[in-house]
């Protein structure tokens, strides 16, 4: 008890020393440095975003003035009201003149109510007016009462643009069409990218619907996750983000529904935090050195046995067997170690008993399931050979006899329960060949192997029952010729073994998995159980059947083991 009390007192003393030193140093650095840097960042960010807002306001006002001036041009209004092909060249020259006068404009487009299109961009000229009238920018313009409308960012052919759209109306206010001015990103991009918002800072623009008008990272427009990442900045308003990693300034651009948002990174604050960390580390080291001489011998005596016990636990957790902890140190530690070693002994005994039980159960189940294979095929094949012999078809008798011999050699597999996939496929091939001799033109089959999976190990006689089901429950009951296909295909890190037939099929029930297995009889259930025993959770069987169309059985193996 005295030793425990002494250790507790030493730990408490060291903790209090560290706590006092860290509190004093941390408070000093935080109040003197962090507060000053935060105030500077906040002021600079707000001033920068305010200046940006006024610049964009002036920039947009100029474009809106250009748009309004064009929509009041008599030639445009006359053409929009009564289209005349002779006027097209003059209007297009007017558009080109405006583009030369304002380098920020990239395209001018006029779409009349009657379906006429005039554009400075030949690619736009080729579009149909009906398609353009259905676009969002056209619909927004005709609902704004001949006022300029700003659109969010969009990709026009190969470049990103922002558009100013405005409705053309006659003297009575009736719609005549829509004028669109496409604005290049270049001016906004050049201005916003040079803002001083920290090394990782940036600015972007949204409208009242929180649609992105401009963002320096253009993948935001096509990525839902990146767009979602901008929400904390939008929702913050004015101030720090919840994680306190950035400072956000917002200001609405007068005369528009746009809001410019500046995100300032806090590298300077991080520098302060780094300085604070080093100061705290220095204080911690100083305190440690002051206390080291007082607690060295006690800590060495108490911690060393605990360290040995921890290392033993880690080795056992990593898979090392028959390892025991060394009993050393104080009486309490010796007792803990002794109980730990006794627990390991009990675990080893339990694991050995479980392994013996599992092995016995596994062998019994595999043997029991294998015994369910129906031998009626042998009798039918012998009847076929006798029939061929009676007709003196000696060559076919030899072929069928060889196939039958190969079939049973593979089925027996020298008494082994496991077989290579290539041999299992060959077993199916011999079975189908023999059945082809019996059914003639009524049966056609196809086998598509993948040599990469030839050495996959699986229980024997798992594919033949599935092919037998396809033949007897699908093809045999069908009028006319039937087709069976066996294929092996790669899927991700595993493979799919697929048995398809175009037989009569059957109606699927709501309990698709179990009911379909039962419908396939003992053979299908046998295959499912044996594959579950061998592959465990890495195996899955799916059955899809359509009446009068056929049935497909798919065996999924997600982990491949070869030998």
Image (cartoon, grey):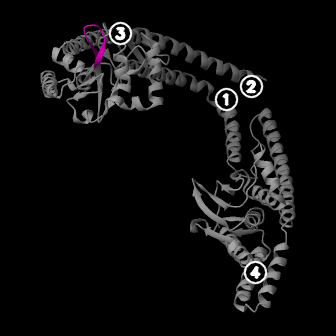
Look at 21% across and 16% down and name the residue there.
Answer: 77
Q: As drawn, is 466 to the left or to the right of 136?
A: right
Q: As drawn, is 84 to the left or to the right of 152?
A: left
| Cα separation between marks 3 and 2 | 66 Å
Which class describes the residues within 10 Å of circle 3: few (<14), some (14-19), or many (20+)?
many
Q: Residue 404 bears which disc, if any?
A: 4
> Mark 1 near mark 4, Cβ–Cβ under 8 Å?
no
Q: Marks 1 and 4: which is nearer the front?
A: 4
Quick one: 443 or 8, which is closer to the camera? 443
User: Is 138 situated above or below 362?
Assistant: above
> Mark 2 near mark 1, Cβ–Cβ under 8 Å?
yes
Q: Tell me residue 296's x, y (percent).
A: 61, 29
Q: Marks 4 and 3: which is nearer the front?
A: 4
Mark 1 vs 3, N-terminal side: 3
Q: Residue 298 bears which disc, if any?
A: 1
Q: Is residue 373 magenta?
A: no
Quick one: 308 or 215, which is closer to the camera? 215
Look at 70% across and 67% down and name the residue there.
Answer: 480
Q: Marks 1 and 3: which is nearer the front?
A: 3
| The residue stretch that appears in magenta | 167-177
Mark 4 vs 3, N-terminal side: 3
Q: Residue 111 bears which disc, if any?
A: none
SS at badge 3: strand
SS at badge 1: helix
Q: Residue 3 bears which disc, if any?
A: 2
Residue 454 visible here? no
Look at 78% across and 85% down and name the residue there.
Answer: 385
């Amino acid at each position: 008890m005295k030793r425990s009390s002494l250790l507790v007192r030493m730990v408490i003393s060291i903790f209090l020393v560290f706590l006092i030193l860290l509190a004093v140093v941390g408070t000093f650095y935080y109040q003197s440095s962090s507060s000053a840097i935060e105030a500077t960042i906040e002021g600079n960010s707000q001033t920068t975003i305010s200046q940006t807002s006024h610049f964009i306001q002036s920039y947009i006002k100029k474009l809106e003035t250009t748009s309004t001036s064009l929509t009041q041009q008599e030639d445009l209004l006359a053409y929009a009201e009564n289209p005349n092909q002779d006027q097209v060249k003059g209007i297009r020259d007017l558009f080109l003149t405006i583009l030369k006068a304002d380098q920020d404009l990239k395209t001018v487009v006029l779409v009349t109510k009657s379906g006429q299109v005039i554009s400075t961009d030949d690619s736009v000229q080729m579009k149909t007016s009906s398609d353009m009238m259905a676009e969002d920018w056209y619909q927004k313009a005709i609902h704004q009462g001949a006022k300029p409308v700003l659109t969010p960012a969009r990709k026009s052919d190969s470049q990103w643009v922002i558009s100013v759209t405005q409705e053309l109306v006659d003297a009575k206010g009736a719609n005549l069409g829509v004028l669109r001015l496409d604005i290049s990103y270049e001016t906004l991009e050049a201005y916003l990218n040079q803002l001083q918002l920290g090394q990782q800072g940036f600015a972007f623009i949204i409208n009242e619907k929180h649609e992105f008008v401009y963002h320096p990272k253009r993948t935001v427009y096509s990525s839902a996750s990146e767009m979602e990442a901008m929400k904390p900045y939008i929702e913050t308003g004015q101030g720090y983000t919840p994680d306190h990693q950035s400072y956000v300034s917002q200001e609405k651009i007068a005369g528009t529904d746009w809001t410019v948002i500046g995100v300032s990174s806090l590298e300077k604050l991080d520098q302060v935090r780094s300085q604070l960390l080093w100061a705290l580390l220095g204080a911690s080291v100083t305190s440690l050195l002051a206390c080291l001489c007082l607690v060295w011998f006690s800590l060495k005596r108490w911690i060393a046995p605990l360290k040995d016990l921890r290392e033993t636990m880690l080795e056992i957790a990593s898979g090392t067997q028959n390892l025991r902890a060394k009993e050393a140190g104080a009486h309490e530690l010796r007792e803990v170690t002794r109980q730990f070693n006794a627990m390991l002994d009990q675990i080893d005994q339990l694991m050995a008993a479980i392994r013996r039980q599992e092995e016995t159960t596994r062998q019994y189940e595999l043997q029991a399931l294998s015994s369910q294979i129906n031998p009626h095929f042998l009798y039918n094949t012998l009847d076929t050979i006798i029939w061929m012999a009676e007709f003196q078809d000696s060559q076919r008798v030899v072929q069928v006899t060889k196939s039958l011999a190969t079939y049973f050699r593979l089925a027996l597999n020298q008494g082994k329960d496991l077989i290579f996939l290539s041999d299992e496929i060959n077993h199916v091939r011999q079975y189908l060949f023999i059945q082809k001799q019996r059914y003639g033109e009524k049966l056609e089959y196809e086998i598509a192997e993948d040599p990469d999976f030839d050495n996959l190990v699986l229980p024997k006689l798992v594919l033949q029952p599935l092919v037998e089901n396809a033949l007897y429950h699908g093809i045999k009951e069908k009028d006319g010729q039937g087709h069976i296909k066996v294929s092996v295909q790669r899927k991700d890190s595993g493979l799919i073994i697929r048995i398809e037939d175009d037989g009569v099929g059957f109606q699927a029930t709501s309990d698709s998995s179990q009911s379909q297995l039962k419908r396939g009889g003992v053979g299908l259930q046998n295959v499912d159980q044996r594959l579950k025993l061998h592959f465990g959770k890495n195996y899955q069987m799916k059955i899809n059947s359509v009446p009068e169309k056929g049935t497909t059985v798919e065996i999924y193996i997600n982990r491949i083991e070869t030998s």
